[in-house]
Image (cartoon, rainbow, N blue to C red):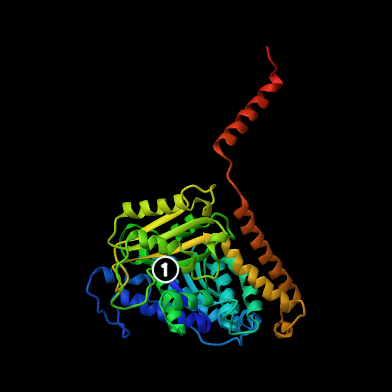
């Protein structure tokens, strides 16, 4: 059994986490009292992957420094002790899954502190984060840009995979695809939970082509810091009698449609470094591979040409409840830099005038930490841009260069 220790930090993280437990509980046939109500032995076969979590209560008042340095630091050891206890009880610990928001004080400050501490104690385990970033139009807190920007550096350094989500993109999906005039946070959280469930499907159910957290990280992260993903889920449609089962071709089209991304960035303005697709249901792996090859051929300009075979596929036989088939999409696109660029603009507008900074310095932070965080996020944006512009050499050019080198190597000997 390959277990995952799940942590949910802050108000947003706990709300998403509660919906996540509801979704996977339903998939495994476990009701809200913990009783087995399932109809298949497969539902209980790998039930031990989840169903343990680290737990604690407090709040950091929307202040990253309070969550990371003062009040959060006091709580961290208690949470870590629970993490150690759960980890020691695992047969084969796969890794850790952290759910949090980057806009608040607890999710951002305490969340990144725990991330760094878990990385130190478990350096060979996989760390995945589902991180809700501040969005341009949907904002709850004035100091969100500070909290989020200060969180990006530890996420880049300690996490193996970071699934980026934001409320604006989720609101858009609910209104456009699900036809909800006034989406509630429960509706948004369910979308996130379906994606989280899809990512770990191969650990929890048997399938034809399997992928676990480690395989996902190895195939999705070509460079250490470029592990920020834009996820999507298909099918997305308003519930009702008119709902019909989609074909593999339609599922694939929905997955690669930028409007269905759960992060507010347009993949058409970037290039995919890598992609992972997790299909669920009784479907043909040959048809899946054929449709994915068709997408890559049709939109070859959206994929970097110097990483061959950069689409990872997993197929699980067990679909989500209520669906015949579904798919989870994970895109490592250079377009994700749009999120960080917007964040930098909002951060700079306030930090230039040192607005609200005193709340952070009063918790022991130094101004240099803000400046260093800003610099590192700018470096991250530059790194994404560098690889977006990179082009592979044509085969004839590579052959020409080799021939030229070979000729130069023969020159010193001279002609007989």
Against 253, residue 413 (above or below) is: above
Q: Residue at x 65, y 82 (%)?
A: 143
> How many marks can you see?
1
Give 155 or 73, whichever is nearer the viewer. 155
Q: Could you tell whether 78 is left or right of 277 in the image?
A: right
Image coordinates of residue 282 in percent, x first then y, are 27, 61
Q: Residue furthest right?
A: 353
Q: Quadrant of residue 30?
A: bottom left
Q: Residue furthest top?
A: 416
Q: Residues within 10 Å of mark 1 (few under 14, many from 20)?
A: many
Against 363, residue 152 (above or below) is: above
Give 149 or 212, whichever is nearer the viewer. 149
Q: Quadrant of the N terminus?
A: bottom left
Helix, strand or loop status at disc 1: strand
Q: Residue furthest front?
A: 242
Q: Residue at x 48, y 73 (%)?
A: 84
> Is residue 323 in sight in this rendering?
yes
Against 44, residue 316 (above or below) is: above
Q: Residue at x 52, y 53 (%)?
A: 303
Q: Could you tell whether 156 is left or right of 256 in the image?
A: right
Image coordinates of residue 110 in percent, x first then y, are 58, 79
Q: Quadrant of residue 403?
A: top right
Q: Which residue is mark 1?
A: 233
Image coordinates of residue 366 in percent, x first then y, are 74, 77
Give 273 or 23, whichever is nearer the viewer. 273
> Is residue 153 in sight in this rendering?
no
Q: Quadrant of residue 111?
A: bottom right
Image coordinates of residue 313 in percent, x first then y, are 40, 56
Q: Quadrant of the C terminus?
A: top right
């Amino acid at each position: 059994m390959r277990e995952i220790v799940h942590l949910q930090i802050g108000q947003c993280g706990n709300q998403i986490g509660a919906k996540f437990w509801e979704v996977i509980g339903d998939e495994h046939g476990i009701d809200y009292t913990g009783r087995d109500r399932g109809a298949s032995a497969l539902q209980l076969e790998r039930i031990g992957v989840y169903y343990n979590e680290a737990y604690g209560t407090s709040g950091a008042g929307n202040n990253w420094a309070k969550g990371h340095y003062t009040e959060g630091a006091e709580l961290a050891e208690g949470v870590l002790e629970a993490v150690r206890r759960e980890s020691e009880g695992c047969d084969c610990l796969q890794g850790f899954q952290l759910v949090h928001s980057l806009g608040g004080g607890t999710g951002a400050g305490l969340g990144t502190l725990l991330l760094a501490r878990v990385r130190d104690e478990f350096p060979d385990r996989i760390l995945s984060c589902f991180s809700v970033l501040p969005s341009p139009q949907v904002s709850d807190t004035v100091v969100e840009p500070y909290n989020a920007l200060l969180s990006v550096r530890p996420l880049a350094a300690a996490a193996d995979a970071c699934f980026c989500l934001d409320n604006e993109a989720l609101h858009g999906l609910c209104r456009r695809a699900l036809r909800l005039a006034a989406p509630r946070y429960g509706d948004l959280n369910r979308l996130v939970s379906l994606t989280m469930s899809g990512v770990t499907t191969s650990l929890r159910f048997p399938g034809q082509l399997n992928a676990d957290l480690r395989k996902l990280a190895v195939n999705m992260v070509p460079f250490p810091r470029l592990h920020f993903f834009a996820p999507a889920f298909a099918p997305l449609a308003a519930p009702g009698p008119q709902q019909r089962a989609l074909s593999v071709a339609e599922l694939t089209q929905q997955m690669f449609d930028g409007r269905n991304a759960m992060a507010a960035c347009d993949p058409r303005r970037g290039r995919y470094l890598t992609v992972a697709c997790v299909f669920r249901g009784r479907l043909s792996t040959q048809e899946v591979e054929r449709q994915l090859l068709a997408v890559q051929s049709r939109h070859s300009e959206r994929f970097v040409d110097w990483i061959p075979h950069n689409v990872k596929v997993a197929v699980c036989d067990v679909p989500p409840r209520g669906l015949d088939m579904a798919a989870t999409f994970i895109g490592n696109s250079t377009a994700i830099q749009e999120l960080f660029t917007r964040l930098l603009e909002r951060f700079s507008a306030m930090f230039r005038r040192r607005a609200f900074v005193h709340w952070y310095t009063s918790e022991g932070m130094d101004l240099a930490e803000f400046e260093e965080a800003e610099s590192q996020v700018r470096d991250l944006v530059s790194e994404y841009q560098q690889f977006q512009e990179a082009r592979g050499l044509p085969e004839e050019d590579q052959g020409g260069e080799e021939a030229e080198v070979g000729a130069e190597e023969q020159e010193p000997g001279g002609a007989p």
